[in-house]
Image (spheres, rainbow, N blue to C red):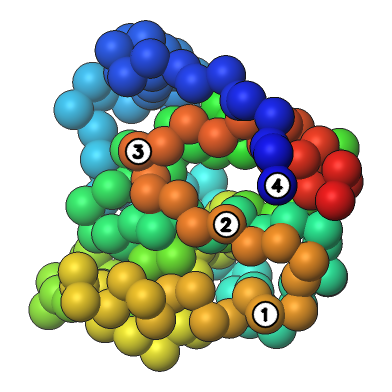
Amino acid sequence: MNFPKANILHEQSYAIYTTNRAEQSRNNLQLSKDSHLLEWAQEQFFNYDNGHDIFNIANNVRDPVLVIGVKTAALSNFACRQAIRETWRQQVKQLDVEVFFLGCVPITSDERLQNAVTMEKRVYRDLLTEELECEDSYFSLADKRQYFHKTSYVILVDDDAFVLVEKLVNVGSMR
């Protein structure tokens, strides 16, 4: 079967683009240049309604044509998730696509980090951790794919990938 060729963004161009988007995001959120998950969460605790319950994302998903699961480390890759939210994830709003970050349960005894991950889940509603029933390690990567079996197409990508969502949807509709 022949598939159409997709445009691929050069790695250096993507790095420059994501760096610029992260800088723009930090400016919009009024965060320092070295801001990370803990600093972001601290800002959110002041601005977010803490009475809001976290809902079980995995059980409340409609059946989209395409689910993009983004493998991520919940504790260390916050900047990558933010870059995706601000770039190619924006394309899914008008398409029948869902994007989830698959992070498993963070392994940490630091309660501040646990609370920061919980806050990120509340704010964005796209990060799956406890729902996946796996530990966040290299050896559990395969466990992250089993929860999206009711959709037509599932693709797993790393959190340093740039996805041309519209092209993926077009390839799927040609079948």
Out of 173 and 62, give the one closest to the viewer: 173
Instruction: Please tell me in which quadrant of the rendered image residue 114 appears.
Output: bottom left
Residue under label 4, please give it: 1
Residues at marks 4 and 3, CA–CA distance in whole angstroms: 28 Å
**What is the three-letter code of the residue carrying label 1?**
His
Label 3: element kind? loop
Query: Vertical placement of 164 versus 17: above or below?
Result: below
Q: Is residue 174 above or below residue 70?
A: above
* Among the 4 quarters of the image, the one containing residue 3: top right
Q: Residues within 10 Å of mark 1 (few under 14, many from 20)?
A: few
Question: Label 3 near label 4: C-beta < 8 Å?
Answer: no
Badge 3, how many Cα within 10 Å: few under 14, some, many 20+?
some
Residue 78: mark in rendering: none
Nearest to the eye among marks 3 and 1: give it: 1
What SS does tag 2 mark? strand
Residue marked by disc 2: 155
Between the C-alphas of marks 1 and 2, the distance is 11 Å
The residue that disc 3 covers is 160
Identify the residue under disc 1. Answer: 149
Q: CA distance from mark 1 to mark 4?
A: 23 Å
Residue found 12% across the figure and 79% down from its top: 109
- Where residue 131 sits in the image (x, y, percent)? 50, 83
